Amino acid sequence: MERTDENLARLLANFAPSADALLLWLQPRVDDRLLREIAMADYGDRAEEHFQALKIIRDQLIFPGPGTVPWEVIQLDRWSEPENPEWKPGLTGPDGHLMRAFCCAVLVRTYWDSETGNFDTGADSTLAQLVASLLVLGPEAVEVGLQLLSWRVLNLEDRDMRPFYALAILLLAASLYPAKTDGPLLGALAEWVIEEGDWLHSTVCDYYGIGSARYRWIVGVGLTDGIKERTWVETTRKVLLESSRTYPPETEEILKLIGEAVTA
């Protein structure tokens, strides 16, 4: 049975939901040099305009209305692969992950926002990229990332996206165990993920006439762009199946079940 909004709010309250926590954390870390790199993502086209608009977002948390500036370069750098030295545009290493996290955070923060025109058709892939970068950037980044994702879930209009957010939150929370999360909390998050995954397959797949058995659980359901399905799979494998962490037995079992379902 799907949990009520009240129960979900109580669960996510563990992460102090906040619209701006992640962007505020990134603010002093994404300097002008990195913003200029993002601004160059569209082959340098209108780079100075993009840069100035990106500065307003970073410094004032003011998001521009619909148009190409700076949304075009934000969307492009969202696809960057900082672990691949041959990937362009974007930088490698921590700088590349800071850039990608910034762009993804802006897209998540403004998702389905008519004032900005951000109707991100690749929202599931944006989440995958953000989670992967936050894990590289470390526990502080993960904590503020959880604040943003929890806030977005509680203000999410696109019901089909909630299973992806549930999985993203579980992966980030599991990466913090045992310092910042505990076994019962992870168990509750895992149960939520299963509820969301089952809803996605039983409700949405039936509605669209999609045979759920042909698709990887949640991330391969075929209703979203699926561009970064591999990122979801690799991140889930690292966090839930290959980690050296030892979870409580009752939590370990359900986390492994989810990990195997996503990576199967």
Image (tube, grey):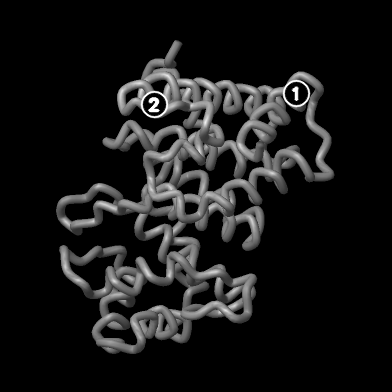
* Image quarter hosting the C terminus: top right
Q: Count neighbours of disc 2 (C-alpha within 10 A) and say few if under 14, some if 14 to 19, many if 20 or more.
A: some
* In the rendered image, the vertical position of residue 110 relative to residue 185, given as above or below: below
Q: Quadrant of residue 256?
A: top right
> From this viewpoint, which residue is outermost toward the top?
1
Task: Identify the amino acid type marked 2.
Answer: Cys
Q: Residue at x 50, y 20 (%)?
A: 195
Q: Residues within 10 Å of mark 1 (few under 14, many from 20)?
A: few
Q: Is residue 29 above or below residue 166?
A: below
Residue in the image at 84% along x and 44% along y? 244
Q: Residue 193: percent from the left, percent from the top?
A: 54, 28
Q: Nearer the viewer, residue 184 or 91?
A: 91
Q: Secondary structure at mark 1?
A: helix
Q: 218 left or right of 112?
A: right
- Residue 235: image location, x then y, percent: 64, 49
Question: Residue at horizontal 44%, vertical 18%?
Answer: 7
User: How many numbered marks are there?
Assistant: 2
Residue 34 left/right relative to 255: left
N-term mark: 1 or 2: 2
Q: Residue at x 36, y 86 (%)?
A: 43
Which is in the foreground here, disc 1 or disc 2? 2
Q: Nearer the viewer, residue 129 or 215?
A: 215
Gap in Å between the C-alphas at discs 1 and 2?
A: 27 Å
Q: Which residue is mark 2?
A: 205
- Residue 117, position as x, y percentages in the image: 19, 57
Circle 1 residue? 253
Q: Are marks 1 and 2 in contact (CB under 8 Å)?
A: no
In percent of width and height, residue 246 lies at 83, 35
Name which residue type carries label 1: Glu
- In the image, which disc is placed on residue 120? none
| Residue 163, placed above or below residue 144 | above
Q: Secondary structure at mark 2?
A: helix
